Image (tube, grey):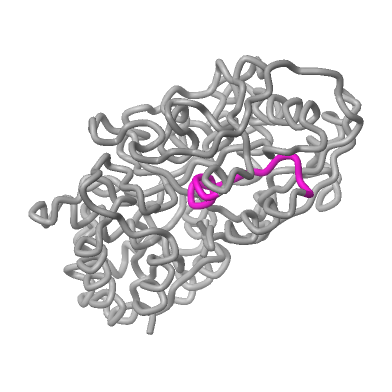
Amino acid sequence: MTNGHGRRRSFQVAALASAGVLALALSGCGTSGGDDESMTPGGEGFQPPDVPMQEELGDGEGEVNILAWPGYAEDGSNDPKVDWVTPFEKQTGCKANIKYFGTSDEAVSLMGTGDYDVVSASGDASLRLIAAGDVAPFNTELTPNYKDIAPFLKDGDWNSANEVMYGMPHGWGANLLMYNTDDVKPAPTSWSAVFDDASKYKSHVTAYDSPIYIADAALYLMKHQPDLGIENPYALDQDQLDAAVDLLKEQNASIGEYWSDYTKEVSAFKSGTSQIGTTWQVIQNIAEVDVPVKSILPEEGSTGWSDTWMVAAEAEHPNCAYLWSDYIASPEANAQVAEYFGEAPANLKACDETANKEHCDIYHAADEAYADKIRYWTTPIKECLDGRTDIECTDYAAWTTAWQEIKG
């Protein structure tokens, strides 16, 4: 996942290994599960360019150029025991040429060069890639493992358009609220702890450092200021964006530090600099070894990420790109990535293959009710993703400008 989502995103993050886990960077975007009829899969109003879908799978071309978040395509270079790329190469005859990226903005830029066949795109990048015509509609009939992907990760606002998938879901997670149990009492149940009540922990509140974090404020406002009419935290008209910005400016007065690298947040909680703020499950797992922390998915729900492998529209090695997309979603490979990266695997059969048999329970991998509470990172675009056609929504560029204004 981040900062992400900047993780990711520019937001994104690149993290480093710790306790057997490893670096990552997340990202993503997405929107949510939920049964809101306005949240049509793929986003109403969004018309992707006419890019043909691959109709059949031919012989592999002998190599594939992979663009990945750190931790998603390990070939033993970082740890000889961590290698799911070599088995892929032996199985398919496709040599994997891997390049890592640090932010979603970087991924979007690199895909624009035409030098890469497949990319692990977070939700804050995927719609930009689709809109630019840099990735192609994805033929799920060519990838047998697609049928075992969790249903709630298919046909999302962040990875589809006009009910057509644009890639293979890979892994996902929620942005949680973490707090030090010695410093924060009573235990929080709402995001109000870091918004309307943030001043109680002045200079000890932390938040994700990325424009996509504006969606967290929008999600809070959906529940607490319904008169704003926000139906989708990634579909904000100017007035709605202004309200979210105002809330984040108020929060800024209580922020001790923002984070985008998860190791930085772990250190901040260990030192006491941070007492409460947004986090990922993997961060809590690492931090709780040294400090009394807990995390919750607040009553308003949360934002989160769901990453998707997307094939380039003009891939030089499309067959190997499809073979990689299917392989990385196989139970065995998906389990390895999920444990190494610290996220829920997209393939539910991966839960039978994890070394830690509690991994999927910890990350709620098969918990659809939990997943439905998450609004997965989705790239904000001018065409309102909530279906409104009588007004223009604010796009990612506007959010980036707003985020700079919020931080001052």
- Is 125 within the magenta? yes
In the visual, does 406 lie left or right of 170? left
Q: Which residues are magenta?
A: 115-128
Is residue 185 in view from this perspective? no
Q: Nearer the viewer, residue 340 or 165?
A: 165
Is residue 190 in view from this perspective? yes
What residue is rendered at 68% in x and 53% in y? 112
Residue 349 % position (x, y)? 58, 19
Residue 28 % position (x, y)? 50, 49
Q: Nearer the viewer, residue 114 or 193?
A: 114
Residue furthest to the front in view is 50
In the visual, does 385 lie left or right of 110? left
In the visual, does 350 lie left or right of 3? right
Specify the quadrant of the image occupied by residue 207.
bottom left
Residue 399 % position (x, y)? 38, 65
- Is 244 within the magenta? no
What residue is rendered at 43% in x and 77% in y? 257
Q: Nearer the viewer, residue 254 or 382?
A: 382
Establish if 354 lies above or below 175: above
Q: Nearer the viewer, residue 54 or 16?
A: 54
In the visual, does 29 lie left or right of 204? right
How many labels, in total? 0
Specify the quadrant of the image occupied by residue 38.
top left
Residue 394 % position (x, y)? 33, 59
What residue is rendered at 50% in x and 56% in y? 5
Q: Quadrant of the C terminus?
A: bottom left
Establish if 212 lies above or below 91: below
Residue furthest to the left in view is 227
